[in-house]
Amino acid sequence: MLAISVYVLLGFYLLYVPYSKPYLGIDLIEENGNWVIEHSHDQLVDGQKISAGDIVLKVDNVQIDDISYIKYDFTIRAANSLTILKSNGEKIHITPTGLDFTERFYYILLIPACYYFLTLFVVCYLHYKQKNTSLLRLLILFMLTVSMAYVSIGASGSLDIVGIMVNRGSMLLCLVLLLHFLRNYYSFLNANWLLFNNIKLFYLLPIFAMLLSYIGIINNNLHNLLSYVVLGVFLVLLILILIILLFSYFKFKSPQLKILLNSVMIPFLPFLFLYALPNILFHHPVLSAEISALFLLFIPFSFIFTQLAERLFDIEYHITRLRYYVIFSVIFTAWFTFGLYWIAGKFLTMTIMSGVSLFTFLSLIVLFYIKEKVDYRKRKILFSTKGDYIHQLYTAVDRIGKTIKLDELLEKFAQEVSLHLELEHVFVLTYDYDTNQFTSMVEGKIPINPMLMEDLKLGEIRKIDKVYLAFLHQDAHYKRALVLGHNNSIHLKDEELLWLELLLLYVNNFIENTKMVEELLEELKHMKQADESQLPWLNKLLWLRFEEEKYQLAQELHDTNLQEQLHIAREVDVLINAKDTTEIQQKLVKIHTQMVSSLHDLRAYCENLKPPLLDTLGLNAALEKLIRKVTERANFLLIYTIDRLYLEDERMNLMIYRLFQELLNNALKHSYATTVEIHLKEMDNGFEVIYKDDGVGCNVNDIIVADSMGIRGMQERVKAFDGQFYIDTQVNEGMSIRITVKEGSDTLDNNAHSG
């Protein structure tokens, strides 16, 4: 409150100074002992026109040679009266007012006054309506200081002592406050602060700037030099802040830091490159200080939206939506204006057309906003300001769906909601119908009335006191609700409520499925403890799977070997009834060849179903024979090594053979490789299969989703023996597969994976 009081008193004084003593800013040059106006401002002052070449004789009834600052500044910044000698020898005496220089009047008095009162209104609103936090207090002080720095430009230009000291001190103080704000905000984000924590030392800089300003007022020949010193310190502080924000953004990639960086960088860069740097390096700014400072006015008000949006740095919601509306409104307005000019341009003035275009543009923006509200209320259709909300929803569902236990599912769900909605207190509450009590309650959280849980309906999200209560799941014994603590500090937007509503529906189904999985696992556990061999449902599942395999085998034999046998039978039948016996011998030879080929195919089927060498000569012999057969058919170089394994579980021999068989078949059919490597290596208590080729490769996700190339079958085989399956492939970069299996575990789990 003290800062606001000082702001009010000091602000009125600083606004009165340029009004009482008009700011002129007339540039002079010394010629033959006279002070000549260098630039013509083409302005009427007290009914007289000031032009380049006029000689200034007196300022405020003081001979110009007796004014010390003119010799160092070469500018008449403010005066109540001027005595000028015109080029025609006429001597005139004029009394300027602030209204004579219209452009200067806007920059020095009117715009600063509007900004001053607007800042006062917003600061009072924040002080009385918003929660009192250290970040908010620093934000208020920062806004007041920026306003003081801007409002004092006129008084400083008029060479008022208070105006100069306030202008120089507030220039540095606003950056020190911004630095202090950033340090506290990084702590709020739990981000590493890149500078030392003792920010209080920087508060000596504004005092130092005010001291230098006072010295410059006493000693006019040092005024410009000391002004450049203060401007240089301002430049160093500004660059330091921008470096901190840039490094932090690229390190943490936080959306809050992105908005903060844009809020600081975009307004400061014009002031930095158009005024500060050119003034220090060349003593000639591209834009004047009062014009360049206009860009700085965006800084505090970009911050203020973060408070009005109820959550710090949530301005992105409003900016993105407004930008979306403006783009479409501008396009249509331009098209409408062109059509209006083409049809009725002869009958309409430019003023009328401009008014119609502006009215159309604003009406479209309002119409878009109303349409959004209607779409949400009636059809649950909503414009998303944070990107693809559907994609974000699916991402959250995917992460939540990977859990296999109910407690883990509820915990992960609460974490996803907390992360997305930027809320700290989010938890799942479980209500027991039998005891009418809560069975799960996070310690230290806000208590909930049990009656509220009983009244909560399916799909309902209700705002109650200091929390949001959202229905999650209900069964015969329990009712679960999601609790979002907001402490009256936030209000969830429509798109956030819609996102939460959809996620609740997904999680409701997840809970049901997870409960079924837990019940199944519990049943399997009891079965194992009871030493039962199988369950009835498992027998049914296995029987159906066997029948499916039989059907596939019968279909394959019918389409290949059986068709060949039928063809041979028809050939023999033709020979039996043939009257011409001259070519019987040749046809019998052909039939014999076909029969031998058919027998080879049938034998190959049998060997695929059960390799005979596995039982007689062992795994190594069976693999050697398989590799010889592949080599005969392959058009690539096959490199292989086969270690001799000593496995207690004989089922593993068949699994290894099937893996080799599937990998080599894939190489023959799909790889188009020039070199293929396959190795069987012995490991402690197990084995390892390594496969590599330099073929066309593919996309891992595509082959898994499509269940092609036998990948899923190999994964299932490895998973059945508690093994691990790794695959690495890219299009046109070949394929590599590594399979590791250890003996001693025949449990079914999810350890096999691809990566």
Image (spheres, rainbow, N blue to C red):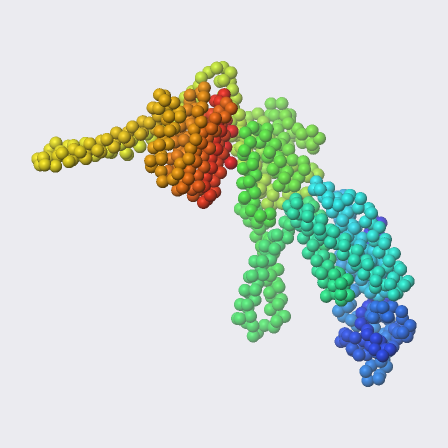
Residue 427 vertical position relative to residue 338 in the rendered view, above or below: above
Tell me residue 475's x, y (percent). Answer: 55, 28
Residue 424 vertical position relative to residue 646 in the rendered view, above or below: below
Closer-to-camera residue (168/615)? 615
- Residue found farthest to the top: 530
60 left or right of 239 in image: right
Residue 34 vertical position relative to residue 155 in the rendered view, above or below: below
Closer-to-camera residue (254/494)? 254
Residue at 61 percent of width and 72 percent of height: 349
Residue 280 seen in the figure: yes
14 left or right of 681 in image: right
Classify residue 160 by image quadrant.
bottom right
- Residue found farthest to the bottom: 88
Tell me residue 49's x, y (percent). Answer: 79, 78
681 left or right of 130 in image: left
Closer-to-camera residue (76/717)? 717
Closer-to-camera residue (242/14)? 242
Residue at 86 percent of width and 81 percent of height: 91
Residue at 47 percent of width and 31 percent of height: 739
Tell me residue 210's x, y (percent). Answer: 86, 56
